[in-house]
Each structure stands twice: as structure tokens, then as C-alpha cells.
Image (cartoon, helix red, strand yellow):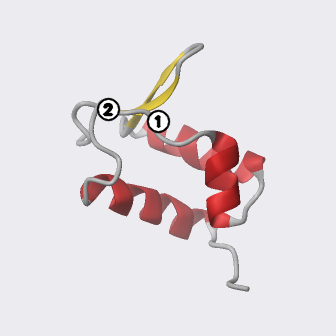
């Protein structure tokens, strides 16, 4: 079983997935639980990573709808 990623590795991989078009601008990213399962980390770790990317302007939260890739991923 692979070692779970560090916070830095997790953020770097989410950014990579956005850059290669796996998560397109304007689209909803997978749920917190789906990401936690994918990366084999806790939900709180995903919350912190998503919060960091939201602060950087890469992701945008929509209350009651989810978290989306910002239309412009460059802050």
C-alpha cells in the first residue's frame, strides 16, 4: 500500500490535475470524501488542502453546491 501524500504533495497533485485538464475551470471537484478515499488521507487533511487552494484563488466554494475550479486558475 502506498504511503499517503504529505500536505504539500497533495496540493501539488491537485494543482497538476487542474493543469492537465482533469478538473476543468468552472467544474465541480470530487467530494471531500471521494478525495480522502483517493489519496488515502483524512477528510480534515482534504479540508485543509482545499482551504489552501481557495485562499490561492485556484478553487471557489459555492455554499450548498460544492467546490469548483476557478474560471481563472492564476491568482
Q: Measured from the top left, where is residue 24 in percent x and y?
A: 28, 42
Left or right: where does residue 27 sit relative to residue 50? left
Q: Earlier in the sequence, mark 2 or mark 1?
A: 1
Look at the picture and state if 4 lies above or below 12.
Answer: below
Describe the element under mark 1 as helix, strand or loop: helix
Residue 17: x and y, percent?
A: 36, 59
Residue neighbourhood size for the residue with mark 2, other residues' Cα within 10 Å, grouped as few (<14), some (14–19), many (≥20) = many
Residue at position x 62%, y 61% in the image: 38
> Mark 1 — residue?
55
Considering only vertical position in the picture, is 64 above or below 2? above
2 vs 1, front mark:
2
- Distance, label 2 to label 1, CA atoms, is 11 Å
Q: Residue at x 69, y 54 (%)?
A: 36
Q: With 44 as the anchor, is 25 left or right in this view?
A: left
Q: Is residue 72 left or right of residue 58?
A: left
Residue appearing at x 26%, y 53% in the figure? 21
Foreground pick, 43 / 37: 37
Q: Quadrant of residue 31?
A: top right
Quadrant containing the C terminus in the rendered view: top left
The residue sitting at 36% across, 35% down in the picture is: 57
Q: Secondary structure at mark 2?
A: loop
Rendered location of residue 66, percent (x, y): 54, 25
Mark seen at residue 47: none
Q: Is residue 46 above or below residue 63?
A: below
Q: Residue furthest top?
A: 64
| Residue topped by disc 2 | 70
Amino acid at each position: 500500500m502506498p504511503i499517503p501524500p504529505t500536505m504539500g504533495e497533495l496540493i501539488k497533485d491537485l494543482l497538476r490535475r487542474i493543469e492537465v485538464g482533469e478538473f476543468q475551470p468552472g467544474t465541480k471537484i470530487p467530494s471531500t470524501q471521494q478525495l480522502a478515499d483517493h489519496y488515502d488521507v483524512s477528510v480534515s487533511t482534504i479540508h485543509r488542502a482545499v482551504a489552501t487552494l481557495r485562499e490561492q484563488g485556484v478553487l471557489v466554494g459555492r455554499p450548498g453546491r460544492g467546490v469548483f475550479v476557478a474560471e481563472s486558475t492564476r491568482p
